[in-house]
Image (cartoon, helix red, strand yellow):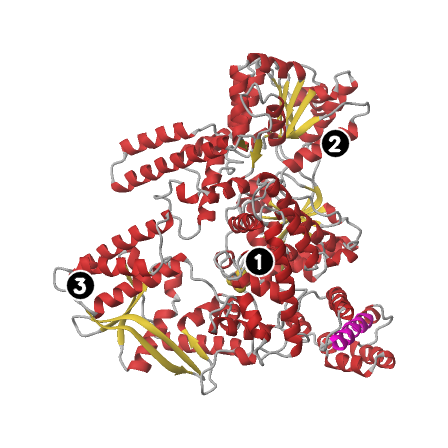
Amino acid sequence: MMRQTDPTAEGEAGGRLRAATHADGPLLVLGAAGTGKSELLARRLAALAAGGTPPDRMLVIGARRATARRLRDRCEALLEGPYEELWVGDWDEIGERLLREHAEAAGLDPFFDVLGRAERLAVLLDRFDSLPLRRHEIRGNPAGLLARLLGRIDTLKSERIGPTTLAELAQRQAEEATDEAGHETARRELEFAELYTAHDQILAESGSLDRGDVFLALDCMLVERPDVRAAITARFAQVMVDELEESTPAERALLEGLAGDSPSQVLVLEASGEGDERGADKTDPGAGPATSRFTRERSPMALEAWYRDLHPNGDVVTLERRFRDPKLRFWKCANERAQAQATAREVEHLLAGGTGADDICVLLADPSHEGGAIAAAMEERGIPFHLAGPTALFQRAEVRDAIAWLRVLADPDDSAAAARALTRPPVELRPGDLARLTTIARRRKLDMVAGCEAALDSPQFQPEARERIQTFLKLYGTAAAAMEERRADVFVRRLIEAVGLRRQRLFAAQPEVAERLLGLSRLAELATAWARREPHGSTRGFVAYLAAVAEAGVEPTGGEEPPAPGAVVGLALGAVKGLGFDHVFALGLEGDAEWGRIGWPAREEMVLSRVTGAEAARPARAYAEALAASPDAVEEEHDEELFGPAEGLHATYRTLREQVLEASWRAGRELSEPRLDTAIDVNRAIARYLELLKLAALAQRPGEEATGDAIEAVNGLLRQVATPEQQAELDASSLDAYLLDSESERGRRLQLIAAREEPSLEAFLPRRGDGRLSLSASDLTLYLTCPLKYKFARVFGIPQEPTINQRFGILMHNVLERFHKEPPEEGDELRALNRLFEAGWRRGGFGDSDDEMQYRDRGREALRLYWERERLSDSEPVWLERKFDFKVADHHVRGRVDRVDRLIDGAFELIDYKTGERKTEEELDSDLQLALYRLAAREAWDIEAAYASYDYVLDAEKIPTPTRPDDAERVERTVVRVGEGVLSQDFEPRPSPGVCSWCDYRLVCPAAES
Ligand code: SF4
């Protein structure tokens, strides 16, 4: 019979002691976050070892790699006597170890490989054309789709649902379906079950398993081989599990299998008494209906019931005293940047006060999307920051440089990769020269590498630019030859050395540099692991694998590398549970992110922060509850700092320090291989160093001397040592102006510093013959979405291959235009539409992959529905693809309207065909495109359009947009704003998850990295 401990009778200390020394029989330890449950397990292991149980006869399982590592560290620290080996690890590690030891009994090849999601993604991508995926929308992104489907397979396996069971469930769903939508869902589910089967077969053929298979195989083995089960239970006198609430049904099946023979299981479960829904979020988004059981089974109440079923006579101890009682602070921030700046400022003060960087943690709902702002704010203050998460590796500048080189070597048509390789060290082609280069490549229809060769003969390039292009071509030529000859891992290491990506190793004593080096070595390790798996694979194969993994945001095998010592860590909120830091900043506590899962990670102070912006989200429940429970707390308000860190001198010193190192490295390279502008670069490097001296002097000046006077005094002394050339560099610098300027707009500091190096792009702005700026409707949208994206696309003109979505959109536009221009005989309309579509399909170079076939089916169906609507329509198309060009303020605005209809009452309607995503209500409300078309119709064609609509051809629906009295004024305001931005070359990036994830320039964009 189970005995419920009464903590009031036995006392907290008694319960804790009893749990720690509990020798035999099952025990469930319940306690809220921060009550020392994990520590209790480590103490228990030490106490039992002191009592004579050999440490290697105790199996201790933690939920995740990081928490298991901490548990292991604590066990090692507490153990006094010698031992052979410890069996302390996370579920994956322990499961694999057990299965490997008994591989033969499990009917497996003893050298089986356990593949992570990234490797399986690569394997499936290799066989993509043979996978059953007709009913799953690919939309030109096979890696993204497969990554989602692999996530679902993993969830199903963790629930012990195999492909056969899933197919049976789908079959039942099909039988019960009452409408076409229900049948289609069931058919898609059946197709997914087929994919699941194919996935498992592919793994089996290569002698590999995935993580889910490990536990399914262990489960089968324990049932079918009682002798092995007995051997395992005889070996482990004790089994201890931390964070039971994080385990999956498949993992818990191991405990079930061992329970009968080895009842000494001590299981730790977080139960805060805050309700059962906690922790119900581990399922992958996109998991189907069959996966909902998992969420139910993870609630504390369900897990306690599971324990009672497993061990009817088991004991239970409840821990109530919380050891962590951090001070709580509440922040209300104007926007994400304000929040990031406030965090970086606080972290800087903590570090200055002696707190170790490793004792500080920043929590984010999704580091891959929200990490950029905080990484940038930390960088501004020179704080070493390690952003953890599956895609963090691919957000690092050095890693992205290496990937850019790999991509352009594998495919010279990859213009974004070429642009990055050309503009980053060691080539550092100036922006204006990049724009000239892309113009040559586009005009002569060359890839960027061939464009470089052509540029060498062009008089447009100065000798310095030509030398830089030659440097690129030399490196490219050498690397391209080696790429064909060497194994991927050897090649990647050589490439890293050859393009000097490791050049900062000289300054590796600095934690932030050590962080970067870690990223590069991680990339080299990935290549090694890949080459081991694919001994006959080519480097191109590795590049394809790397690009797909980075694209799909999948964690590569081996998982996250530990941060370099001395770095503040940024974690996803789901990854912090079970860890402890002195100071924790929980950011973005608005909306419904799963904040209930973070446990109690702070020892001294925890900042709970939420953003209230234009898109003000309500505070997360966790925030509101904590605030309500802290009656004395006040919400601290934080606004964006317009001028970056207030402590200008120190922050500028750190920024400049980086520049001095870069400048001296560049000048040193040129001294070793002199060229025409070597002297300029050497003098520039010395001038930067003198500026650094100036800042150091100003920062340390005693007394209250005014900044202007102090600058003048230091300048006077520097004039005595600088040569005339160096003095000219110092005079041209805007550093003094910056230091004196306390009222400045956002980003001015960086702009001023950058402006010293970056020449104007004036000559590349899109102008008409009369010198006026020329903007199209899509240019306006592009600039408003992200000015930097506009710069890449329109100023640099980096060529991009159209995606399958874009090619399909062009085809549908062409078909509809031709159809209306040359109307077919009555009764032949639908056939004519199909003929036009088929002819365009063939000429458009579409193939017969599943993705393309899906587009074909959708296109044909869309045309059928289009004709259904058209047949019943009273209106008549009067113009098709009609162009306009008119002046707004001082700029030209151009474009074309897909179709203009005259309605039965004589009014005009402007129609824009759309084959992509639908606009939201909010977007329609502030729509610019159709408002611009209305104005264009009036100004350029002299007609008043009463209506304007988007025709969503694939959905067979036409959505009108409302006319507003201030439309013309709004369009004019926007054109003026964009025109001013372009003319003043304000190309500040505007990163946002929704836009950046589809941006073709992610690789070359500095804002997309951390
Ligand atoms: S990745 Fe994002 S920030 Fe960078 S250019 Fe593209 S849209 Fe702009």
Where is 752 relative to 207, above or below? Answer: below
Q: Is residue 332 visible?
A: no
Q: Please, what secondary structure does the residue beneath circle 3 have?
A: loop
Structural distance between the alpha carbons of marks 2 and 3: 76 Å
Q: Please, what secondary structure does the residue beneath circle 2 have?
A: helix
Prevailing SS of the magenta stretch: helix
- Residue under pointer 3: 873
Q: How many marks?
A: 3
- Residue under pointer 2: 74
Q: Residue at x 48, y 35 (%)?
A: 155
Residue 611 is labelled as none
Q: Earlier in the sequence, mark 2 or mark 1?
A: 2
Amino acid at circle 2: Arg
Q: 862 or 886, which is in the foreground? A: 862
- Residue under pointer 1: 409
Location of residue 709 in the rendering, given as x and y in whole percent from the top left corner: 82, 80
**774 falls in the magenta region:** no
Q: Residue at x 35, y 51 (%)?
A: 852
Q: Is residue 917 left or right of residue 80?
A: left
Q: Is mark 1 within 8 Å of ligand 1?
A: no
